[in-house]
Structures are given as C-alpha cells and as structure tokens.
Amino acid sequence: MAHYPTPDGWGCALGVAPDPAGSAAGTRLLKPRRPDGRARLDEPLGSRSLPRRHDTIGVAMRTMRPVHDEWCSVAACAEIIGAKWTALLVHDLSEGARRFSELEHSCSGISPRTLSDRLRSLENEGVVVRRSRSTPPRVEYELTAKGQALLPIISEMRRFGRTWLRREEAAATV
C-alpha cells in the first residue's frame, strides 16, 4: 500500500495487483481507499486522486503504516528536528551549554524570534533544558538525555553531507 495526499485532505491508500494480462512488469491499480481502509464512496463518479499516467505502476511492498500519524516514530522525530534551524541548534548544543547570543551568532541568519521559538519548542519537547544562573546573571541552554539521544542522527547528517553534498559542491566548482 502507498499513501498519496489528495486535495481533499483524506489521502489515498493505493493497492497494486498483478496485471491480469500476466505481464511481469505491469500492475493494475486497485480501488482507491481512505487511510482508514474504507472505500471512497463519497466521491463523484469519474473523480480520481491520481492522474491517469499512474494507472500502471511497479509492484511495491510497503512495510510501514499507510499514513504517517501520531503513532509513526519517524514522523514524531521529524516533528521535533524537522523545523529549519533545529538540527543546527542541536548540533551546536552537542558541544556543551550555550548562551542565547552564542547560538544566535553560530546560526548566522536566524532571527532572535525564530531562535527563541525553536529553543522554546525544544524545551517543551524535553530536548533542551534552560538554566538560569544568578551570578553573573545569564541564561544557558543545554541538551538533556533526550537531546543527547538525537546526536547519532546529527552525526549521520554530517556524514551524509560530507559524502554526498560536499562532493557535489566540489564537482560544481571544477
């Protein structure tokens, strides 16, 4: 089953079946269904979720849920670190506690409001802890154990960037 978003917001779970003509490469489209598995009987006749060119698609076996909902762990993780600047903030905090101004400086281009919003959302998720010191008065942000658990993901992002993105950048300048 594959999930394709539709303009009406329901999405469409598509199943594939072997082509009745016996072609090894072809498949035929099964009836579109809602994410809950029920047939889409509320659509007017002739309406389609996908253009006709998608009628023949390769055989695909999906091993995950047809819809990324609140039970999808990948979607839940992406909800935390998927916002712009968030992965960079986690990366910067991996080296230890940082003050707001230090984070603002390290992420050149981020507005103070965006930085404040990202830090607040990371704090609400339990990824970052905000510590206030009284002498001298300052506020520092530090990764929690949950935040430390994100570091292997950041490390893999670094490795991917070095392997794939930096090479493309170097090839483009040659």
Image (tube, rainbow, N blue to C red):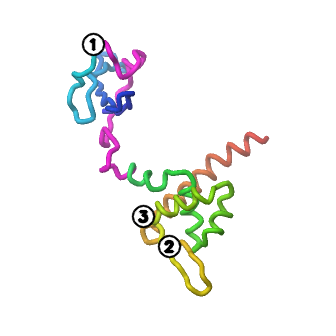
| Residue bearing the label numbered 2 | 130
Q: Which residue is mark 3?
A: 124
Indicate the position of residue 31 as horizontal and vertical percent values.
Answer: 26, 22
User: Mark 1 highlights which residue?
Assistant: 45
Q: Are marks 1 and 2 in contact (CB under 8 Å)?
A: no
Main secondary-structure element of the magenta-colored stretch: loop
Q: Amino acid at mark 1?
A: Leu
Q: Is residue 112 left or right of residue 149?
A: right
Residue 6 percent coordinates (x, y):
38, 28
Q: Is residue 155 above or below residue 129?
A: above
> Which residue is nearer to you in this view: 33 or 126?
126
Q: In what quadrant of the picture does the N terminus appear?
A: top left
Query: What is the CA distance from the residue labelled 1 to the residue labelled 2?
Result: 56 Å
For the residue marked with disc 2, what is the amino acid?
Answer: Arg
Give the image location of residue 45, x and y in percent: 27, 13
Circle 3: residue type: Asn
**Residue 70 falls within the magenta-colored stretch:** yes
Q: CA distance from mark 1 to mark 3?
A: 47 Å
Seen in the picture, residue 134 relative to 153 is either above or below; the reply is below
Q: Residue at x 31, y 28 (%)?
A: 14
Disc nearer the start of the sequence (1/3): 1
Determine the CA span between mark 2 and mark 3: 10 Å
Which type of secondary structure does the marked residue at label 1 adopt?
loop
**Which quadrant holds residue 41?**
top left
Residue 165 inside the magenta-drawn segment: no
Q: Residue at x 57, y 51 (%)?
A: 160
Q: Is residue 34 left or right of residue 155?
A: left
Q: Earlier in the sequence, mark 2 or mark 3?
A: 3
Of mark 1 and mark 2, the one earlier in the sequence is 1
Secondary structure under tag 2 reads strand
Which residues make up the magenta segment?
45-74
Q: Element under label 3?
A: helix
